[in-house]
Image (cartoon, helix red, strand yellow):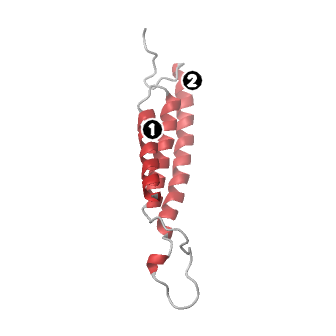
Amino acid sequence: MSELVVALAIGVLAGCGTWLLLRPRTFQVVMGLSLLSYAVNLFIFCMGGLRSHAAPFVPAGPPPDPALLADPLPQALVLTAIVISFAMTALLVIVLLAARGLSGTDHVDGREDER
């Protein structure tokens, strides 16, 4: 049951992020990139396996079964991806603010729709 909930959450985040990426305003594009990065982070984290009550460390004594331990690699990858996506979002916001100052609009192609 928890796998279904996580899969639905990843799908909803990825779908909403893709939809927002296709919107004409720059703030919506930034939010879409953020949602898409959250979906990818959740996907990478879940690839390590959904285990509850798994020990994050090896206890003293005989070596335990590796299938009973939590995998630290997806956690390290997600932590790195969070830092990179935060830096990317900050840079994108600065670039978009500069573009808005130069063009006078927040439309992604630099001009408003003519109506």
Q: Nearer the viewer, residue 109 or 62?
A: 62
Question: Residue flagged by tag 1: what amino acid is it?
Answer: Cys
* Residue 115 percent location from the top left of the image: 43, 8
Q: Which mark is residue 101?
A: 2
Q: Quadrant of the N terminus?
A: bottom left
* Residue 67 percent location from the top left of the image: 44, 77
Which residue lies most toward the front here?
A: 1
* Residue 31 percent location from the top left of the image: 52, 37
Q: Count the marks.
A: 2
At 49% from the left edge and 68% from the top edge, which residue is drawn?
Answer: 51
Q: Secondary structure at mark 1?
A: helix
Tell me: residue 109, above or below residue 42. above
At 41% from the left edge and 38% from the top edge, which residue is drawn?
Answer: 18
Q: Secondary structure at mark 2?
A: helix
Question: Residue flagged by tag 2: what amino acid is it?
Answer: Gly
Left or right of 60: which side holds 33?
A: left
Measured Cα–Cα span from mark 1 to mark 2? 28 Å
